[in-house]
Image (tube, rainbow, N blue to C red):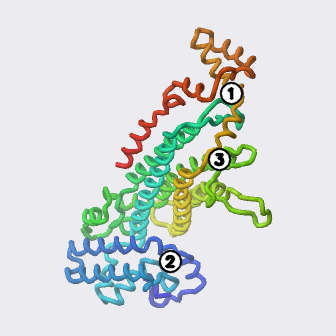
Amino acid sequence: MTQPLWQKDGIKIDAKIMQFLAGDDVLLDREFFLHDITASKAHVEGLANIGVVGADEAAALKRELDALAGDFRSGAFVLDERHEDGHSAIEARLTERLGDAGRRVHTGRSRNDQILVATRLWLKEKLATLQALCRDIAQVCLDRAAQAPLPLPGYTHLQRAVVSSTAMWFAGFAEGFTDNALRAQQTAVLIDANPLGTAAGYGVNLPLDRVHTTQALGFARMQVSPVYAQLSRGKFEMAVLEAIASALLDLRRMAWDLSLFTTAEFNFVKLPAEYTTGSSIMPNKRNPDVVELLRASYASVAAARCEIEQLLSLPSGYQRDLQFSKGSLFHGVTHGLAALELVPDLLARLQWNEPAMRAAIEPSMYATDVAIEQAAAGVPFRDAYRAAAEAASAAGAGRTPESSLEARVSPGAGHDLKLDQVQQRLDAISG
């Protein structure tokens, strides 16, 4: 490992302690490294604006930062255990290439605000991906909800309840993922604040050009208080994980439905072959493994959020405990987005088995229609309810799933799903 930035003369570094301190931090920093370089360029520009580095030095530093980014992308530079972390690697590279100019690059900043700003840029990028994925899922659901509806039993308590349709099923998830896209957008507004220039949490005795770095890095606003910049670490990360978890909660329920609907007992849905796997011992099996792992994915994101929450039992100011939040954040975010990425194609290509769904609709499922009709004709609802219950087995006489859905005229129900209203909301988020 290269010499730590904080090493003092006369103090020996114990290798085992150093390994514990570093952990897998430098490997995780690979995910944030390019954002760290981007923020470093803005910091150099800010230093030049206040005369801490000269124009020629700033140009050289930015040139070498661009070169480092290119080498990292190509694999010519590998961020590994030779470095304590990504921040140290950047400074070491600049010092090696530029001497004193490289030694000036850290003026006015700490690794604390350096990781804050790199992580914040990464989180903004991931929220944009989350919003796009939720929009895509919602749009697929809207498109399929607009197709000719097929009869589908509606369940409560996992018992057959009333007549529903494939269009109603898709419409429900369309609105859910529209809300999830909105939540991603709102979370992006929350975290869109520049912490660079807050140093170790108390500012510095330099007139740092934080307005410039905020604009250069594309932040909507400056995170004003250095103390709050530290307090927001973990809090903002949890907000992003909560936005992803919101989408995965809907995905979990969708996956539960598909897990049931693909069983031989239901036989309502056939999945695309690519979304199933075989058994290692039973030649006859095709298993909905992808759907099951989609259903399980919420747990990974919830666990990441929980781990960060547990780390935040801290006083104000920076504490080294927060280093452990990086792994939780990375794994929770990347796994959650990877799960959501599979959903649009899955939903676009799954096939409904209309005969099986129609056969599952039994006469008693029209009893609610009978009771409501009698109530609309003037019979007190509770009396109509009892009469319909007593004759439930005959409630389907002369009725079809299509007639039941056509008569369902309450807004958003089978007769009028109000898909245009959901589409308008989704389009507004897209804009």
Evaluate whether residue 313 shows in this view: no
Q: Is residue 371 above or below residue 212?
A: above
Q: Helix, strand or loop at disc 2?
A: helix
Of labels 1 and 2, earlier in sequence is 2
Write the residue at 21% across / 72% down: 50
Q: CA distance from mark 1 to mark 2?
A: 60 Å
Q: Which residue is mark 3?
A: 269
Q: Residue at x 61, y 33 (%)?
A: 164
Query: Does the image show residue 307?
Result: yes
Instruction: Bin the neighbour count of mark 3 within 10 Å (Cα to Cα): few under 14, some 14-19, many 20 and up.
Output: many
The residue that label 1 is drawn on is 365
Residue denoted by label 2: 26
Q: CA distance from mark 2 to mark 3?
A: 46 Å
Quadrant housing residue 369: top right
- Disc 1 marks a residue whose amino acid type is Met
Which residue is at a point 61% across and 50% down the rendered structure image? 252
Disc 1, SS: helix
